[in-house]
Image (tube, helix red, strand yellow):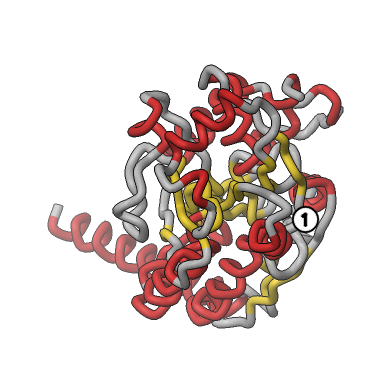
Amino acid sequence: MLVLNKIVKGFTLIISSLLLLSSSIFAADFPKGPVELVVPWKAGGGTDRSARIFAPFLAEELGVPVNVVNIDGGGGWVAWEQMAKWDANKDDHKIGLVNLPHVFAYLDPKMKRTETVGDFNFIGGQTYDPCLWLVRADDERFTGGLKDVLAYTAKNPNKLLVSTTAIGSDDYQGLAFAEKKVKGFKVAKVYANNDAKKVQELLAGTTDMIAGNVSYYVNYIREGKMRPIAVLDNVRSEFLPSVPTFGEVTGVENLGFAARTLIAANGINQEKYDFFKNAINKAQANPGYQLAELSKSSRIWTASGSDLKDFISNTEDMVKVVEYWNQK
């Protein structure tokens, strides 16, 4: 029996050594070169900014350069269609950003898309950026905040000009939800290609309100150029603690956000998937990265596994309730 125990222990040591050797060989062999971080919009937007902040910290953990690649068009779907078809071998040096709720544009029958969120190999969350409504700081019509805006729209339906992004974007869906759930709230949407255009329109007086995201507009608030009237989240923003949520004012919870997730190619082997996941987790825990996102008033979001799956499912349910594609 003693001899047998020694043999078993010997085999255990050999197996453990082989596993460690295999792991070290894999670590040395992957990744073999630069990794692409694919952004589904052109350079300059919030997602691109966040990706470029994150890239050097992720590169530090991966041990290779991380190159941000922008693929614009189709409200994100030009890039997402490619991501859904990434090959596990040819595209194993790519990770991509998929934004919620934007990706659920496929629920619109007019999109005629066959891809769904089930076609993405999610790794985890990256950042979470709640939506925010703002007016010009010198606009005396709305000194009372959201209550004044609601009173104005009730008396003047479709007269309030709101600068928003494309149909199906997070800020657009927040407006669509309010129009569906708040009696008398009807606005005229002015579509801008990016946040810079929204700022230009509002400050020039060609629009009355902006629907955007907290991280992009905090500095305009601090500079006294804009006045925030509501955050579209279930809690107040830690960056704007004095600004009420939409639900606090109306009694109707309106969740608008840009939740950015990271994906890998479908079918990628478990070692590579885990390598990416561990590197992402370490990069997100880096104090330098945390400070960089904090300086931009952006919230790091580390959801994964069942928590991320539930979040995706709940977001899809929310979009189905709004059915923004059926609203004018």
**Residue plotted at (57% across, 36% down):** 174
Above or below residue 269? Residue 65 is below
Percent x, y of residue 20:
41, 71
Specify the amino acid type for callout 1: Asn
SS class, disc 1: loop
**Residue plotted at (61% across, 52% down):** 263
Q: Is residue 198 visible?
A: yes
**Residue plotted at (71% across, 48% down):** 165
Q: Is residue 280 visible?
A: no
Residue 201 occupies quadrant? bottom right
Q: Residue furthest left?
A: 2
Looking at the rendered structure, the number of numbered marks drawn on it comes to: 1
Q: Is residue 208 left or right of residue 86?
A: left
Above or below residue 28? Residue 229 is above
Percent x, y of residue 56:
55, 80
Percent x, y of residue 112:
86, 27
Percent x, y of residue 172:
65, 39
Residue 159 occupies quadrant? top right
Q: Which residue is mark 1?
A: 193
Quarter in which the C terminus is drawn: top right
Q: Is residue 328 left or right of residue 100?
A: right
Above or below residue 163? Residue 179 is above
